[in-house]
Amino acid sequence: MHQLQCMTCGRICADLGAASCPRDGGVLDVLYDSVEIPLNYELPGIWRFAARLPLTDPAHIVSLGEGDTPLLRSARLGTENGLPRLYFKNEGMNPTGSYKDRIASVGISLMRQLGMPSWVAISSGNAGASLSAYGAHAGVDGYLFTLERAPRAKIGQIIAYGPQIMSLRGLGYDPQVEAGAWQNVPRICQINNWLMLITARSFSPQSMEGAKTIAYEICQQLKGDAPDVVYVPVGGGGLLSCIWKGFREWRAAGYIDRLPRMVAIQPAGCDPVAQAWREERAIVPLDDCTSAVSGIILTAPPDGDLVLNDLRESEGWAVTIADEITYQAQAELANREGLFVEPAAAITWAAVKADLAAGRLTGAEKVACVLTGTGFKDSKAVQRMSENVTVPLVDVDEIMRLEP
């Protein structure tokens, strides 16, 4: 069993469909009756952790096989750069190609249990694809508002699943539009008894519980140990906050005896969390966004304050990476590791290299990078990697002229 508690005033919220505290609008945390995390391997994917997910009846589970993504020890980049214990958690192996499938599975399952007819979300692409796929599998309707500048490859995937999709003018680079969206989506959900599935703890605290299973799996895959440092891309901030919660819960359950340091990575040109961290102040929304790294560009991150708190609690830090460096990291992961990921995922490796160069990492650490989505999510980034490569045209008899 679970309950919702305001992280600001401590009030217990009786409405399990609530998105925020009815008293002060604070973020709701999901609390469970026991710190134990018994595992049920008869349930699919992330649902083996059902005892610490907000669903009371497993009959409502909607699963496409999410979770159990590989934690790969670096084949080359780690040793080449003096970091032999470098690992990549490849979330692009989820059913729709990103970690958002974990959140969608919990959200759509919860929606069925609550008897709600439809879901509404705001997404730059990955969350929209996940929710649309899981909604289609469950046979429920959905409404999606996406970024005006969202990559067409992501939008095409969403369209294939069949939700009602609308591009919101100004979203992703206009703070006033973002603020208006955060206000209007909760209102329309309340009016129609729809479930809001914005992938932020500030708006969908129960659905976001799915993301913390990444931490559970990392510790299992490290055979009962925790990494020393975990690198996480930050847009809205919910992913890092949930992963940190997962590590804390896994330790409380007695499975590990220490916690990692968390690192938040943002792109230059859209890094309100990293700026606030460096300047030791509260987050101030940016006036504009000049980064092109889709998936992690929000001028006013809804869970940014949670990230700052988690960085302090974990003794971690924040890093800003230029877009061009991120694209270089994307190419390196592909041609040195065989990992084809989107720029928003590759930014983690770029940050690791930056921290090695700056002396923040000694090389002795056990480091985990969360690779959030597959490379096929961003067609422009794919084109960028290949546009200057010439593929020669040869005759069939030239095959035998190849030399080792």
Image: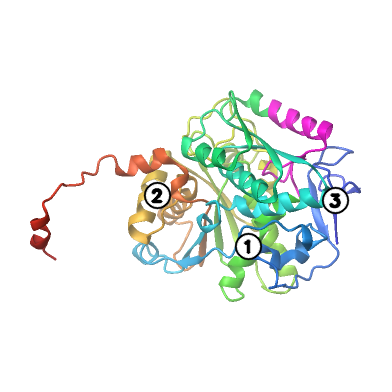
Residue 105 in which image quadrant? bottom right
- With respect to residue 229, does 380 lie above or below? above
Residue that badge 3 annotates: 5
From the image, which quarter does the N terminus lie in?
bottom right
Q: Identify the amino acid type marked 1.
A: Ala
Q: Residues within 10 Å of mark 1 (few under 14, many from 20)?
A: many
396 left or right, relative to 304: left
Q: Is residue 312 visible?
A: no
Residue located beneath label 1 in the image = 215
Q: Secondary structure at mark 2?
A: helix
Name the residue: 91% across, 48% down: 14
Q: Residue at x 56, y 55 (%)?
A: 95
State yes or no: discs 3 and 2 in contact (Cβ < 8 Å). no
Residue 20 falls left or right of residue 182: right
- Magenta stretch bounds: 180-205
Residue 137: x, y in percent?
65, 51
**Residue 330 — which label?**
2
In terms of image quadrants, where is residue 230? bottom right
- State which tag comes first along the sequence, 3 or 2: 3
Say whether disc 2 or disc 1 marks the residue closer to the N-terminus. Answer: 1
Give the camera-side residue of 136 and 74.
136
- At numbered mark 1, what does the secondary structure look like: helix, strand or loop? helix
Q: Residues within 10 Å of mark 3 (few under 14, many from 20)?
A: many
Work out how far the residue at label 1 is from the one at label 3, CA to CA, in angstroms.
22 Å
Colouring mode (rainbow / by chain / secondary structure / one colour): rainbow
Circle on res. 128: none
Q: Earlier in the sequence, mark 1 or mark 3?
A: 3
- Measuring from the top left, give residue 236's x and y in whole percent: 63, 41
> What amino acid type should be assigned to the residue bearing mark 3?
Gln
Please state, as top left, top right, bottom left or bottom right, where the C terminus lies in the image: bottom left
CA gap, disc 2 to disc 1? 23 Å
Is 250 covered by the magenta stretch?
Answer: no
